[in-house]
Amino acid sequence: MGLNSPGSSASALRRRFYVLSLVAASFFLLLLGRLWYLQVIQSDEYVSLSDRNRTRLIPIEPPRGTIFDRNGELLVENRPSFSVALIRQEIEDPDLLLLRLSTLLGVPYNDLQRKYTLLKRYPPYLPAPLVNDISRDTMEILQENDLHLPGVMIKVIPVRTYTQKERGAHLFGYTGEISEKDLQDPNFTGYRPGDMVGKTGLEKHLEKELRGISGERRVEVDAHGRELRQLQGFAPVPGKKIYLSLDSQLQKVAEEAFGEESGAAVAIDVETGEVLAMASRPTFDPALFSGGISLKEWNALRDDPLKPLQNRAISGQYPPGSTFKLVTAIAALRNGAATAGTTVHCGGSITIGKHNQVIRCWKRDGHGSVDLRRAIKESCDVWFYEVGLKLGIDKLAATALEMGMGQNYDFPLDSVKKGLIPTKEWKKKRFNQSWFNGETAIASIGQGYVLTTPLQLAVMTAAVANGGKVLRPQVVKRIEDLNGRVIFNTAPDTFNILDVPPGMFASVRAGMEAVVHEAGGTGAASRIPGLRIAGKTGTAQVIQSKTAVANGDRKILRDHALFVAYAPVDKPKIAVAVIVEHGGHGGSAAAPVARAIFAEYFGLKDVVTPALKAEPIAPAPETLDPEVSPSELPEEVEAIPPLPDEPAAVSPFGD
């Protein structure tokens, strides 16, 4: 066996050395290249990551704008609130963290876990709200345990507080966390997940004015996430100041006058259309939504059979009953179907149609010979049946629409309803049926298909008071910026002017004054010594549902009570519309509410205006005796719903 020569061994070693050197050089070059790439090409990105690891960006919610009444009384403001937020990128063990928070906060673990899953829509480096509106004691407990709560921070955020508690809740509305759907809406550009926005009422309608501009803080934190110092930032800009036409004291009186009864009242200035009071009962506390309402509380409000979330003043659609006779009278006068001196004999009923259908007056033995003034004063149905039939439904409907019925006026709330003013064409499209004379007679006294809202009745009453000027109702008086500069100022807005000679309104107004101040008038309960009031009572018939009859529920079988009025008679200033659900009769149930409003407005403090108590429920008679008996309605007339239509409640939990 031969041996390698010394020369060949050295050559092999040199080749191995060269190969190893080449490999080492290649590795070193790759390392240098990577280092150059990281330090030069991606330097900005890694500097940003490094900064992010030691700094924290904290958005600052702007305080929402404040809301005042017409006299400058503060109605809606903000208070500081402690909120627990999580920064997900700093959390190593979410389950362990949530268990600790559940113990410290007293919140069920499953609730926190459910909320945590929703936080994935937030950027991981931004604080995302987990629990809102915790107490100061709870906040201090969290601070004492901060070393065991990585990724947890306490934010101080402004939340809404309502100085009037439940009063005005439907008008103000409430706030809630912005939904996923809204975040995709161009109208919410610049909003972040977790931002609070207006969900209903003026809070929603005036979102842009109330929102303000967000601020932010960039702070340096230590390894435990504790703040060391602020690096930079800018303060938020609060929202604007909103001044309403509302009189807070008048609002208080209007709401308290209902006592435990359900209903609505609207008071407006007859020359400007400004809403002075808008009450809806029952009501709710909008502050429940400020810190985040619980699902249990929300379900209780939403499912309450008394519908406290519904703004009955604008979305309650009721048959206007005899208050609609004012519209019928003006329609008949302007179309030549009657004059102030037109006399009709009321024997307690009329007979119409080929089937000799009998439709009765509320007064079974009749009113005798009746002219317009007495027909309004004593609410004689037969007079209005006769002139309504002569007038016709389409002419009646045309005047009703011109007087503000069937309109929403572009009022700044989402839940405004138009009601219903029927016509021949409407019925043909709706039911594919012809119109019947019996339906015209019933519509002439505000029954049948006719539906109106309390706001519409107030607008109509103001038009009668001011001589035919139908004003668009307004609730925002002016808007100011932080420096007090007025950026919006409301002005009277005329919706329509009725082409009616002044004398025609005079005859109707004379009848309304007699309703309150003469013997036999149906509105005596609204009288106030020293104040001349013109009004009209109404009773809106309620359908007798089989369920209510079977359950023996006498109250929900009772008619709705209505009253519309203005004062003073010689120089009208304020018009009022009131409905008390299942109150019985307008003169005894609704008129006292209007009386309380007038007494407050005119400073008649010596007038006793106790909380409303509806008529006691008498034992059920064999047959009811409303203004029109259900059995005597034309068969073609649609049954009147027992409760007004209700708009869908807006959930504070997003979509």
Image (spheres, rainbow, N blue to C red):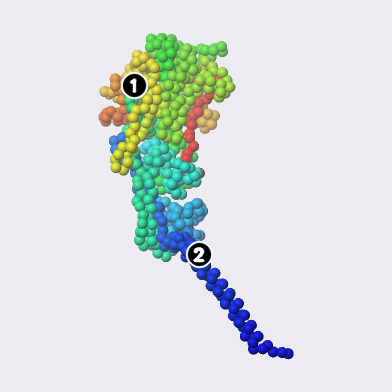
Residue at 44% over, 37% down: 308
Q: Nearer the viewer, residue 623 or 258?
A: 258
Mark 2 highlights which residue? 37
Where disc 2 sits, the SS reads helix
- Pinpoint residue 138: horizontal percent, then vertical percent: 39, 56
Q: CA distance from mark 1 to mark 2?
A: 81 Å
Q: Which mark is residue 113?
A: none
Q: Position of residue 441 (x, y in %)?
A: 48, 16
On the rendered image, what quadrant is the N terminus found in?
bottom right
Q: Quadrant of residue 334?
A: top left
Q: Is residue 21 above or below residue 569?
A: below
Q: Position of residue 534 (x, y in %)?
A: 34, 21
Q: Nearer the viewer, mark 1 or mark 2?
A: 2
The residue that label 1 is drawn on is 466
Which class describes the residues within 10 Å of circle 2: few (<14), some (14-19), or many (20+)? few
Q: Is residue 213 visible?
A: yes
Relative to residue 89, is residue 575 depicted above or below?
above
Nearest the eye: 561 or 549: 561
Please tell me whether mark 1 sits on a helix, a strand or a loop.
helix
Nearest to the observer: residue 182 or residue 348: 182
